[in-house]
Image (tube, rainbow, N blue to C red):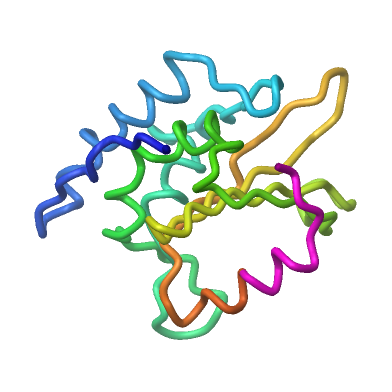
Amino acid sequence: MLNLPELVKIPDDAIFQVPELFKIFKRDFIDSVTYFMAYLVIISRPRAGEVYPEIFWHIISKQEQKGSKSNNTRGIDYERAKRLCWIKPIIQNFRDEEITCWKSKEFDKNAGKELEKYYLWYKNGKFLVILKCVETHKKKFFIVTSFYVFDSNVRHYEELCKKGEKVC
């Protein structure tokens, strides 16, 4: 049985909660080590001039739907941010019966080649964590994203799961 922490309580003025959310992220991924399948999960450092790592912003926010796709504005996503504290336990407990885990080879634009992506779906909590495997000197994993899976998207991820290779 998967034992996850309670959802993070986020008031309506969530932007003022970012430092508190970062404390959770820092505790789980910077101040401690996280492993997936016995390999290290790496968090990239913040870009020059930035306070927070890019992946932190990515997992607590979503693309604003206003305007064109070239709009890079991201706003706090309450459903993602509330589940920030679930990411590490889901990664560490990917073999739990409540986690559906599969992998697939997908083109990664940053790497310029196909990489294996691992999907860890906690269906009961409607939450998905995606990792990518990178092999340089040693095999390691990076968090690609995590997000709340709305009912309208369940069928899409069920199809991806069927096409992918079951991991556990």
- Residue 62 at x, y percent in the picture: 42, 63
Determine the residue positioned at 33% across, 47% down. Answer: 83
* Residue 102: x %, y % from top left: 71, 52
User: 129 or 99, which is in the foreground?
Assistant: 99
Lateral position of residue 138 relative to residue 154, left or right: right
Comparing 92 with 111, the one in front is: 92
How many badges with numbers are in the image?
A: 0
| Residue 71 position (above or below residue 100) | below
Q: Residue at 76% of width from left, 38% of height from top?
A: 133
Q: Pick the quarter of the image with the N terminus.
A: top left
**Horizontal arrangement in the rendering, residue 7 relative to residue 58 (left or right):** left
Q: What residue sits 74% from the left and 27% below the top?
A: 140
Residue 160 within the segment the image draws in magenta: yes
Query: As rendered, which of 135 and 4 lies closer to the eye?
Result: 4
Quadrant position of residue 12: bottom left
Is residue 40 covered in magenta?
Answer: no
- Observer-nearest residue: 72 or 154? 154
Q: Position of residue 101 (x, y in %)?
A: 65, 49
Q: Residue 20 vs residue 115: left or right?
A: left
Q: Specify whether 33 is left or right of 67.
A: right
Residue 92 placement: quadrant: top right
Task: Check the picture and name the quadrant holding the C terminus.
Answer: top right
Span of residues in magenta? 158-168
Position of residue 50 relative to residue 108, above or below, is above
Residue 88 vertical position relative to residue 130 in the rendered view, above or below: above
Return the x and y of residue 71 as percentages of the image width and height.
49, 73
x 70%, y 20%: residue: 38
Residue extending farthest bottom: 67
